[in-house]
Structure formats: structure tokens, C-alpha cells
Image (cartoon, coloured by chain):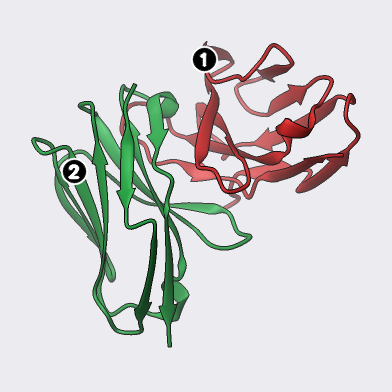
Chain colours: A green, B red
Amino acid sequence: KNEVEQSPQNLTAQEGEFITINCSYSVGISALHWLQQHPGGGIVSLFMLSSGKKKHGRLIATINIQEKHSSLHITASHPRDSAVYICAAQAGGGADGLTFGKGTHLIIQP
Amino acid sequence: GAGVSQSPSNKVTEKGKDVELRCDPISGHTALYWYRQSLGQGLEFLIYFQGNSAPDKSGLPSDRFSAERTGGSVSTLTIQRTQQEDSAVYLCASSLGGGYSPLHFGNGTRLTVT
């Protein structure tokens, strides 16, 4: 069974700061998902990646397959980025093999 | 376009009663997943459908839980004889299927068992 660890568990930062959230997993995977969950809201898929780096707006996700590690970066953070960020490791060909991290609770203060 | 729709959004039920949760996936999405998120806990996989079949039911916590999908579309998750520990947000997600299709989540059903 894959063990997915996220750090930090909680992060409070000032508006404008560069944010990094880390995710490590124990077993080789086919893909890594980054999800965003706003308080009281649904879950949005931010990225799914199996190698290298992806960028969407101010969000960047990277993965190092050899080191079994992924990072989510937020540039020029804004209070609306406040949410729980969850990484999930996909073991096989479908998302049935997803193992979730416990999430990183991010608060961006104005 | 329409996203993944779940109903009801909230459900309060008495211990011992049966409940049925519904998920309408995005049209054309062949893969459908049920997850559970308990208070203060991470997401937990329950069951996965590819079309109408469920190749992986390993996440269902007990035989009180069952799920079906008909017509490759709507899915229902049924919990029989509910217990207080069943209280959680039940989330449904769908995708186009295949190995690298992103998930689209519904807003979940918040189940409270009193």
C-alpha cells in the first residue's frame, strides 16, 4: 500500500509570498494528482502529472519520479488561494488506485 | 457544461435507517468513483466503476455499503443500517476513463447519522 505524506500540514503566509507544498510517496506510481478543496466547497482537480512539470496560471506542479516526490508551488499568493491542497498517488491505470495525503491547510493573509 | 451532480447535498438520518446517495457524472465519462471524507480525515476510496461494472470494491468499509451504476451513467451508493461512524461527506468523481484522465468531483453529500 502506498504511503502518501504531505508537508507542511498547516501553512500560514502573507499575501504575495511564494508557497511550496510537498508530497512524497513510498511506492512507484503512474500519476500524481493535486487537488484543491475550499472550505465548505467541492474538490477541484488542479494537476495530474506523471513526469516533469506543469504550470497553470500562478500554480506550478513538479514531480521527481526517481525520488518519489512532488511539489506544488503558488507564486504571488493571494487570500483566495486559501484552501486545503491534497496530493494523491495513482498506482495503476485508473483512479481506483488513488491514495490520498491528509492535505495541507493553507491560509494566505492579506 | 454540467459538472458532476450529487444529491442530496445534505442528509440527516437516524441510526439504523438505510440511505441512498446519488451521483450524476459528466455525460460521456465512463469512469466513476466514490470517496468518503470523514471529519478531520483525508479522502478514502470506496469504489470505482468502469461503465456499469465495478472492478474494485475493495474500499467499501463493510457489507452494509453497496453501490450500483446503471446505463453507464447514474450511480447510487446505498448504506444499510447506518451507524454514527458512517457520518461523513461522500464524494463522487468521474473521468473519461483510461489512465490519465483528470477527475471531476461533485460537491458531495454530507451525511449525518444521529
Q: Residue at x 18, y 43 (%)?
A: A69
User: Where is residue A110 drawn, in percent x and y?
Assistant: 43, 88
| The image quarter in which residue B109 lies | top right
Toward the bottom, the furthest residue is A110
Residue B50 in view of the camera: no
Q: Is residue A106 left or right of residue B27?
A: left
Task: Name the quarter where the C terminus of chain B is drawn.
Answer: top right
- The answer to which of B79 and A54 lies nearer the viewer is B79
Seen in the picture, residue A41 relative to A89 is either above or below; the reply is below
Q: Nearer the viewer, residue A74 or B86?
A: B86
Kindly identify which numbered label has been placed on residue B58.
Answer: 1
Q: Give the residue type that dot 2 points to.
A: His
Amino acid type shown at disc 1: Ser
User: What's the residue at 69%, 42% (across, down)?
Assistant: B6
Q: Secondary structure at mark 1?
A: loop
x%, y% of residue A4?
A: 32, 37
Name the disc covering residue A69, or none.
Answer: 2
Location of residue A70 in the rendering, given as x and y in whole percent from the top left corner: 21, 47
Quadrant position of residue A109: bottom left
Q: Is residue B12 left or right of residue A86?
A: right
